[in-house]
Image (cartoon, rainbow, N blue to C red):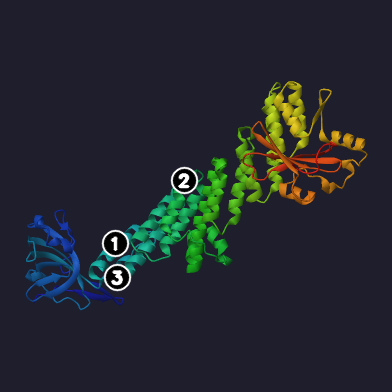
Amino acid sequence: MNRAPSAALVVGGILVLAALSVVAATPSAVTVEPSELARRGDLVGFEVIVDDRIASYHYRVGRITLKRTPILFRLPPRLRCDPPRRVTAARIQGILRSAGNQGACDVTAIEFFPSDLERLNQKVAVLSSSDFEHRDAWARWAERRGADLQDYELLERARALEGEAIRIEAALTANDSRKAKAWLALARKARDHHVPEPEPSALAHAAFRARLAEASAADDLRALVDEIASFFPQAARPVQVDPGAWEGPLAQDPASGYLAVSAAARAALDHRLWADATQRLLERRTADAPQDAPRLADQASAQLPDRPLVARRLLDGGLATAARDLGSLRRADVEAMARLYREKLGQPERARALVRDWLDDQRQNHLNPTDAEGRLLLAGQYESMLGDQATATELLRAAWKIDPQSKAVADAFRRRGFRKVNEEWVEPRQLRDADVAMAGEPSVSTLPADVTLRNRSPREVRARLGGKPNRVVWSASQGQLIEQWIYLGPTLNRYVNFLRTPGVPVPRVVADYTRPRATSEPLSAP
């Protein structure tokens, strides 16, 4: 048996295997995966290079087989030797003579190696601290080898090494203008290659935080929310964890801060990242389309139940923005907004202020000097929407001044208890005080304040006046319905007018006055 000199040397306690004939790829040599070699009939007659673990080695007869190929490798006498005990793998170069399960290859050079794990660590140990490319290449080599040979220790080392390569590459791109994109690509690569957590997630957090800081358009924020949810499928689920001492470090370095906290805290950070992006998206969409604020606020309530103030702010901000352009709003819009102020935000005073501002804008900017009908309609709106009898009366008087022959305006005065005296419409209080003085009874103005029924509901009127009215009369005009309740008395009859308006469920009192009862009038309804 011929043995090549110095096949194995021990230097500083480290086994160094010297090649019997070092494999050096020639331009014509083809590197082939062991599992592919038997299927490569096109390479018969060509020089190939194969790297694999040794399955069997009969150095006396010069026969060697590898783990992942059935090809028989035939060694010439000059390459036959008894290798050191720690040899487990070899890189073989030779001419493929035949393929298939009975294929053979004549070896021209062979290089022996220790275990894959030892070989990997030796190669990585000599790399510079910034060489992520070779670390990544060796990680790929070890991952493929470990998967094929079911070597879980090698697989674990391969994934740890890839995580190290990814960290180095991420650090080198920290000052790059496109770092967020690069980091996210690295995080996805780490996740795809099964790099142990939390390494991939930490890098993704840094990438998503950087993108969130830069995103402003709704489309960019929508894409970001979707990507966060895709990378962290449980992120939409609220997790309550006290941030504690890691809040500061996390703000300075999201990746390192993420790595330093517990698994429960990382789950909370996943949710906070998603919630921050979702909140920013809803705020952007509300700013772009204030009219959608109610729907977006409902969406915020459903998606961010742990952030109840977000929905309120969205609704409040959207309503405030919409209210800046009063002239573009319709009555239905204003009533819907006022209802939201009352029911969703608990702010009835702002609801009333919005309605008044809109009505005042209609009065000041949308009535021409000769529009009697417009003033008549607006008077009804001041009454039905605000219960503002004084402004309604001003508008009716202005409408009458424009068109003193208008039957609609005259009917509107009469429904409110006015009486035409010398071509002027006299309001109910003036008539009431005069009539009461003539009857020798106290003026209504001297009665207790709680007798006033203005803006009361039918239920409240019945409670204050002791039950149902003696008579009920209806009259309709200009799309509005007046329901008049009449309470008969010994000397005075009381008239209470309710205004019924479409879309308003509970009518309110718009006029309340008394008149002397005619002596022939019965005391009860017929």
Q: CA distance from mark 3 to mark 2?
A: 41 Å
Is 410 left, or right, of 261 in this rendering?
right
Taking the spot 29% from the left edge, 70% from the top edge, the residue there is: 154
The one of 71 and 25 positioned closer to us in this rendering: 71
For mark 1, give the secondary structure: helix
* Any part of residue 288 in sight: yes
Q: CA distance from mark 2 to mark 1?
A: 34 Å
The quarter of the rendered structure image containing the C terminus is top right
Vertical position of residue 382 compared to residue 130: above or below? above
Taking the spot 30% from the left edge, 68% from the top edge, the residue there is: 155
Say which amino acid is labelled 1: Arg
Residue 319, position as x, y percentages in the image: 62, 43
For mark 2, give the secondary structure: helix
Across the whole image, how many numbered discs are drawn on residues?
A: 3
Is 244 left, or right, of 69 in this rendering?
right
Mark 3 / mark 2, whichever is N-terminal: 3
* Any part of residue 131 in sight: no
Picture quadrant of residue 243? bottom right
Q: CA distance from mark 3 to mark 1?
A: 11 Å
Say which amino acid is labelled 3: Leu
Mark 3 / mark 1, whichever is N-terminal: 1
Taking the spot 26% from the left edge, 68% from the top edge, the residue there is: 146
Q: Which residue is identified by label 3?
A: 154
The quarter of the rendered structure image containing the N terminus is bottom left
Q: Are marks 3 and 2 in contact (CB under 8 Å)?
A: no
Say which amino acid is labelled 2: Asp
Q: Which residue is identified by label 2?
A: 220
Residue 459, position as x, y percentages in the image: 72, 50
Q: Which residue is identified by label 1?
A: 140
The one of 438 and 192 positioned closer to us in this rendering: 438
Residue 149, position as x, y percentages in the image: 23, 70
Q: Residue 419, labelled with which disc? A: none
